[in-house]
Amino acid sequence: MYVVARSKDSNTIPASNYFQTLYALDVTNGTILAWQDISATLANGNARSFDPLHENQRGALLFQSGQVYVTWASHCDKGIQHPKTASWYGWLMSYKLQGTTLQQTGAWTTTEYPEGGIWQSGSGPAGDGSGTNLYLAVGNGSTTAAPQATEGPCTNCFGNSIVKINGTPSGGTFTVLDSFTPYDHPYRFCNDSDVGNAGVILIQGSGFNVPNLLVQSGKEGNVYLLNMTTGQMGGYTGALGSFTCPVTKPTGNDNIVSFFNGDTTVNANGMCYDTATECGTQGSPVFWNNNIFFGPRCQPIKQIALAGSPVALGYVTATTQGGVVDQMGCKSPNPVFHYPGAQMAVSQYKTGGAILRALDNSKYAHSPPFPAVLYAYDANNIAAAPLFSATVGSGGAVKFAVPTVANGHVYVGGIGQLVVFH
């Protein structure tokens, strides 16, 4: 098992006294097999170095083809506001265990200038089964086609994008094979409407006219359905050239398989209830039986189906119970999951059935934090009353904690506790 730990060696602030360390552990007894302090420097374009104080390793780790992949963003954009006081980037690194040594095999940043975090609400990179390719979503940052004017030209920059990466490092870094950037990227950048707010779902061998699909949704609540095939992810169809904020929202279209509009002023079943402060998915969706479940902020859980030829996204239903009414400023009159929305897991139950588990972590911000609440729904009928609900122990909720289902049990982590349901 691989974990990343943070530490400091004194009470002083210089970043040199802060460390992030990757450990390889023996899962049978917890023995440390190897460890390596994390560092990296890239010289291409704008020179940049890994900052262990400001980089935030939020996403899950991915183990694929003998390598472990780790991603970073920051602490709530700390230090990135102008004037910039810190430089953090969206880093992707890979390591390989060789004997008793963890060797770094690759390092890459999503942009050449600060920002471009790999947030994904705790989700890690996704592997497509080839043993090589990786997919991830990137937050606000410059792109090569439309960089922020204050930063200048940006080569190989993928802010506000979904990218496909060759996970086999070459020359100590990674190659982007394909990408998708929404046409209104400059507007999103200026309004903090990151694409990379949630992770991606890969649906391979789907049986539809596009056999290999990718699903992702971000802060604005829109859902993107992409073709995973290299050269067909969608690219960028928006205005070219540098931009300066503020930017007026443009009109246009993306060259993708299907699009679900999250704006409830346009789509009554969207995922932005009222204002930009109540918008979008703050956790990653889950997939079962050609249905995708989303847990948007200040909204009930939404079920959207893949159907038709050509395949398209279509609204099915939403939960009517679970969560609470009018907590933390949400204006929806219905029971909803507040920030950061429902964190979910789905697992098969008996023939043709499945259970959707949804964790309400919204009370993580209380002082002291309150426990999370776990709900269980029939995945064939999420509009019905929950099958089960329970407070998760007595420890405080963790912002992006996700329920884990294994061996007939549900495991939920909290502050100072691990609670098991069965």
Image (spheres, rainbow, N blue to C red):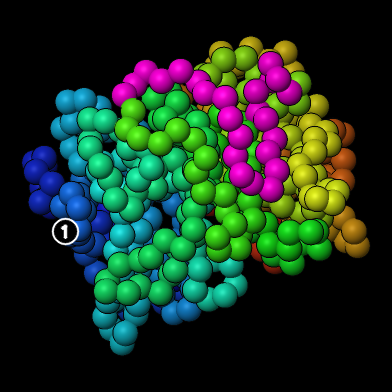
Rendered residue at 80%/50% (across/down): 310
Percent x, y of residue 179: 49, 53
Q: Which residue is mark 1?
A: 43
Percent x, y of residue 29: 43, 76
* Residue 87 location, quadrant: top left
Q: Main secondary structure of the magenta part?
A: loop
| Residue 416 in sight | no
Which residue is at the far bottom?
Answer: 99
Front position in the image: 285 or 144? 144
> Would residue 329 appear left or right of 257 to someone viewing this image?
left
Percent x, y of residue 41: 18, 59
Q: Amino acid at mark 1?
A: Ala
Which residue is at the far front?
Answer: 240
Percent x, y of residue 227: 64, 56
Front position in the image: 310 or 269? 310
Rendered residue at 25%/56% (across/down): 20
The quarter in which the C terminus is drawn is: bottom right
How would you rate the neighbour count of disc 1 (Cα within 10 Å): few for under 14, some for 14-19, many for 20 or more? few
Front position in the image: 388 or 254? 254
Residue 250 painted magenta: yes
The quarter in which the N terminus is drawn is: bottom left
Total of numbered circles in the picture? 1
> Would residue 284 appear left or right of 52 to someone viewing this image?
right
In the image, the segment drawn in magenta is 244-267
